[in-house]
Amino acid sequence: MSTLTAPPSEARGARALAKRLSLHLDTLPTAAAVTIFIGMIVYGEAAYGRIVQFNTLSNLLINNAHLIILAVGLTFVILTGGIDLSVGAVIAFSSVAGVMLMNAGWDPWLAMGLMVLIGTAFGAASGVLIQYFHVQPFIATLAMMFLGRGLASILSTVPERLADDSPVRELGTQIKLYDGPKVNDVAITPGVIIAAVVVAAAFFVLHRTRTGRTVYAIGGSEQSAALMGLPVPATKMWVYIISGTLAGLAAVVYTARLGSAQNITGIGWELDAIAATVIGGTLLTGGAGFVLGSVVGALVLGLMNVLITRDGGIPPEATTIITGGILLVFVLLQRAVLARRRE
Amino acid sequence: MSANAHRPAEALKGLVRRQYFWGIVAIALLLLVNLIKDPGYLAFSIGSSGNLVGNVIDILRAAAPIILIAVGMCLVVATGGIDLSVGSVMVVAGAVSMEFLSGAPDTVGSGLAAIGLVIAVSAALGAVNGVLVSVVGLQPFISTLVIMLAGRGLAKVITGGQNTAATNESFRWIANGYVLGLPVVFLLALLLALAMGFLVRRSALGLMLEAIGMDAKAARLAGVNRRALLFTVYILGGVLAGFAGVFATASVMTVDVSRTGYQLELDAILAVVIGGTSLAGGKFNITGAVVGAILIATLDKTVVFLGVSSSATPAFKAVVIVVLCLLQSERVRRAFRQRRAATARPAEREAVAA
């Protein structure tokens, strides 16, 4: 990270600029993500129109609130050099279980709390496997992914609809902040507010607390972090618990918006969340990255979906191919940057 | 220590070491359960055209695709990697072959051409994984995860989102035909597994793969061509998964883009782990993987036979994977060792006193 002091003098012109750039080399992917996001907006506006307007941009936030929450959770995990492949399946199990409980007469708020706690439980299970039994992160979370998907399928294989008068739906109702002409309003949902709070809290934890610095230190070198006396085992447990809990929270937000849950919800979302995190500039090997970058990454993916829908020429099935392609390109970019820095 | 004082215990330990022995025990137990439900479960009969017909034959037939992906996964896992894309390679292979055959004449030639096409496409997908892992140096699970999720999208793009069906008798024969009274699929799968086993165990190839899995750097210093080997292993895994896709689609001559091969990477990983291959890499056992695959097929059939909802099996399999991972972990092994040492200690003391 660029905690080093700024170059001594700005006056040296090109050389100083080059040095500054090389110092900030690890922000390059994030900068690239921001550039791509702006580029996509400009291209979309030019090619299809009606992109830079209040309701499109509000909808971008509303429709991707769950992805932002997931990406924040994965940022923690990936920063430590781990991975969490279970988030999509956790959402499936948590949302199906939650909706079924509510339909069975449970208090909706209690059920929502349980949905979040289901995520916490999955995260804790992965964390124990990884930290105390030294199972590789991707194996442990892969097992949790199959477990979550399997449990969701046991519960139900058809869409479970939320009752129309359920207070959960309120989390997905739009609140107009600014009443524009026709439908061109600035609107948010409580889901978006939740996502914003999550992002702010994650930013604070990662950049302003000891826990956050330990997360970065583990990603840099777990051994060194342990030798420095940092609480490595506890922190590693925490990142998986955070990731699981946020997956549970994302399940609440998504279910509230959609009004139904199904066992196939969230297939491939682990890829989306990993892609958002990596696009946002977090190193897949850990140790460097920004939580705000992950938000940009999530928005890039969301905007991509909007553009694909607007274009109409690309089959929606191709979305995962494109997401995968983008992820690979960014991983290659990271490799190049790392190789450059080592020189 | 008190090694020769406990002959029977020592023999038992040897059996425990051979982990796939427990796989065979589990298969026997499952068959026993079925036998209790229906005393005629294991019965064979000679079908109309001189073929063996029976539940066991069904199990062998269902085991064929799992055997193939398990063998491929086994080699990949030996290098310390993982291939999450096998299920998606299967569906792409199925989509390619069905899409090709639906427009081709019903001849042996077009059946063979479809298989050639499948080999080419699945080798290409395996090569993508291979390049990303060996040349780019990406973590295996990321590159294969991308293929796993993008592959299903690719299959949908190939068939236009449809579940394409086709007719080709020679292609269908692969899945439904019989040689010497046994299903062709099983014989083919066994043959391929044997060929793979011979290839890696009768040459230094297997050792080299294990060397990479144990310590990539040491392997390189010892002169193992890590890059080329990894590349080959992922291509092999891809081609085997492609064949598995042919097996899975040829029996019904339809590719189901959202269900063919779905979550079969779970079966492959489970088969490999049951067979005693460590997911940490560095050792593998192809015989074990084959036993594991047959066990999974037996389990699937048993669940259906007993009338248990088959939606519960993935969760159950995931739990088994977690348990096996725990058994492989150092902490649990140490706990077991300590307990064994604690029970052995009194005997030792007696020996010293004597």
Image (spheres, rainbow, N blue to C red):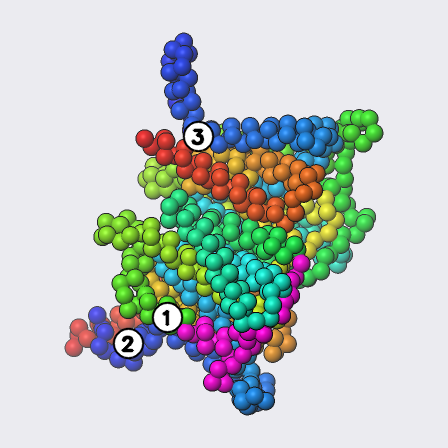
Measured in 3D between alpha carbons, the distance from the residue under mark 2 to the one under mark 3, in whole angstroms, is: 56 Å
Q: Is residue A177 left or right of residue B331?
A: right
Q: Is residue A171 above or below residue A87?
A: above
Point out the image quarter for the C terminus of chain B.
Answer: bottom left
Residue behind mark 1: B195
Closer to the camera in the image, A37 or B307: A37
Residue sitting at 33 percent across and 55 percent down?
Answer: B229
For disc 2, the marked residue is B10
Give the residue type at disc 1: Ala
Three-letter residue code for mark 3: Asp
Q: Position of residue B191 (x, y in %)?
A: 41, 74
Q: Residues within 10 Å of mark 1 (few under 14, many from 20)?
A: few
- Magenta highlight on residue A282: no
Q: Which residue is mark 3?
A: A26
Q: Amino acid at mark 2?
A: Glu
Instruction: Name above or below for residue B135 compared with residue A135.
Output: above
Q: Earlier in the sequence, mark 1 or mark 2?
A: 2
Give the SS element for disc 1. helix
Name the front one of labels 2 and 3: 3
Kindly identify the residue that appears in the image at 37 percent across and 31 percent down: A340
User: Magenta stretch?
Assistant: B162-191
Q: Residue at x 76, y 36 (%)?
A: A174
**Same-chain check, marks 1 and 2:** yes
- Front residue of this view, candidates A38 and A78: A38
Q: Position of residue A215 (x, y in %)?
A: 45, 38
Q: Are marks 1 and 2 in contact (CB under 8 Å)?
A: no
